[in-house]
Amino acid sequence: MNDNILVAVIMGSKSDWDVMRYAAETLTEFGVANECRVLSAHRTPDALDAYMQDASKRGCEVFIGAAGGAAHLAGVMASRTIKPVLGVPMASALQGLDSLLSMVQMPAGIPVGTLAVGKAGAVNAALLAIAILALTRPELAVKLTAFRKKQADKILAEMLP
């Protein structure tokens, strides 16, 4: 395990890696130390609790939780820390609607910032984590500003037939 992680990416199943690797890749592209794990809120609750405590002690500042169906990994993670938890719903039997609703309808008191279902949500969770970290890290603010400018320049350079 990396001793200097800033963002932990936790998914409920190894099958979620096909999508969540985009979060890890985005964080790595920005130079943000991250760590990815498979832990289940329902099948490995003690291991999840231990990991949340350990990651916080090692300096983790933002957590990303991904799960499908009605499993609510991100909500359980948020109940174990006061640090930001970002949820990424995974596609499921109901095209991810069940996953999305289980995250966005959190009762008041323990918030989970919820992103889109699937790849877009994974990338945006990483970008939101970077924006949170950039509040106290000017070098990340510079990188994030450059990233957004590159996106804008690409759109402005597109020509229609």
Image (cartoon, grey):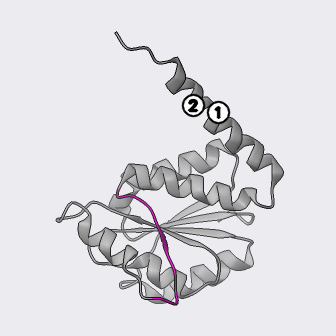
Decide which of 110, 52 is in the foreground and name it. 110
From the image, which quarter does the N terminus lie in?
A: bottom right
The amino acid type, in three-letter code, at marker 2 is Ala
Q: Tell me residue 21's x, y (percent).
A: 47, 51
In this view, the residue in front, 56 or 129, is 129
- Residue tagged by mark 2? 152
Question: Which quarter shows the C terminus?
Answer: top left
Q: Quadrant of residue 4?
A: bottom right
Residue 43 as seen in the image, left or right of residue 46: left
Element carrying mark 1: helix
Q: Is residue 47 left or right of residue 136?
A: left
What segment is highlighted magenta in the picture?
108-117
The residues bearing labels 1 and 2 have C-alpha atoms spaced at a distance of 5 Å
The crowding category of the residue bearing disc 1, from other C-alpha atoms within 10 Å (few below 14, some 14 to 19, many at least 20), is few
Q: Is residue 133 magenta?
A: no
Q: Amino acid at mark 1?
A: Lys
Residue at (36, 67) in percent of width and height: 13
Q: In what element is the residue under mark 2?
A: helix
Q: Please report contact status of discs 1 and 2: CB closer than 8 Å, yes or no.
A: yes
From the viewer's perspective, tell me whether residue 4 is left or right of residue 83.
Answer: right
At x 77% / y 42%, what residue is drawn? 142
- The residue at which mark 1 appears reads as 149
Report the magenta stretch's main SS: loop
The residue shown at (31%, 73%) is: 101
Q: Position of residue 18 (x, y in %)?
A: 37, 51
